[in-house]
Amino acid sequence: MADDNKPLLIKRYASRRLYNTETSDYVTLEDIAGFIREGREVQIVDLKSGDDLTRQYLLQIIAEHESRGENVLPVNILTDLVRTYTNQAGSVVPQFLQMSFDMLRDGQSKMMENMTKVNPMAKMPGFEAMQAQQEAFMKAMTGGLSGGMSGAWSGPSPDDSAGGGDDEDLDDIKKQLSELQAKLSKMSK
């Protein structure tokens, strides 16, 4: 069994093929992305020179996902990142980004923990579907979205009934959701 605390060592050969040293087989960028989604740290090194290529390959994985339309990074953020390479502000950006992602990850953990506790919203029709959507969103924002998920709506279809499901119930749910969104907006300010 591999030590999950130790980074998975991937060696890049001169042919640019990537070799998983734990399983003794070749892997693709998508395989590496899968290891990372599963919570595994990876280290990619050039076999000949010993250079650490991890950053280069992680950026390539992100670029491939973005080019396929799996956009997580807005254009203005990408533009700002490019600007940081040409000015003195670049020295604080890595720490800021690390702190931001740490806060996002902590917030996700706390939100998921609170959602699993008994709360009055759990009795609301459609709550389970909404909870699943929020979990998928948070996984996507933190890089934990599995490759098999399309991001499509996974809740009940319009013709499903949620315990009788008349229009008044739907309107009431929409109103409650709107109120919750307003409260969340106020909390984030």
Image: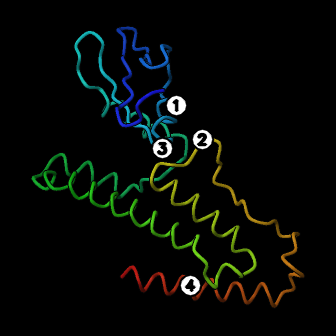
Give the residue at mark 1: 30
- Going from N to C along the chain, the mark reached first, 4 or 3, is 3
Query: Could you tell me which residue is drawn at 42 percent across and 56 percent down?
Result: 74
For label 2, the SS is loop
Q: Are marks 2 and 1 in contact (CB under 8 Å)?
A: yes
Task: Give neighbour class at mark 2: few <14, some 14-19, many 20+ (Cα, 10 Å).
Answer: few
Q: Are marks 2 and 3 in contact (CB under 8 Å)?
A: no
Q: Is residue 70 left or right of residue 177?
A: left
Q: Are marks 4 and 1 in contact (CB under 8 Å)?
A: no
Residue 17 against residue 143 in the figure, above or below: above
Query: Could you tell me which residue is drawn at 45 percent across and 53 percent down?
Result: 142
Query: Could you tell me which residue is drawn at 26 percent across and 9 percent down?
Result: 48
Give the residue at mark 2: 147
Residue 55 against residue 172 in the figure, above or below: above
For label 3, the SS is helix
For label 1, the SS is helix
Give the residue at mark 4: 180
- Going from N to C along the chain, the mark reached first, 3 or 1, is 1
Query: Could you tell me which residue is drawn at 48 percent across and 26 percent down?
Result: 1
Residue 66 has which mark?
Answer: 3
156, 107: nearer the viewer = 107
Task: Give neighbour class at mark 4: few <14, some 14-19, many 20+ (Cα, 10 Å).
Answer: few
**What's the distance in space between the residues labelled 4 and 2, CA to CA?**
30 Å
Quadrant where the C terminus sits is bottom left
- Going from N to C along the chain, the mark reached first, 4 or 1, is 1
- Going from N to C along the chain, the mark reached first, 4 or 2, is 2
Q: Is residue 118 left or right of residue 143?
A: right
**What's the distance in space between the residues labelled 4 and 3, CA to CA?**
31 Å
Kindly report which numbered mark, 3 or 1, lies closer to the viewer in this rendering: 1
Q: Amino acid at mark 2?
A: Gly
Q: Amino acid at mark 1?
A: Glu
The image position of residue 49, as x and y in percent, is 22, 13
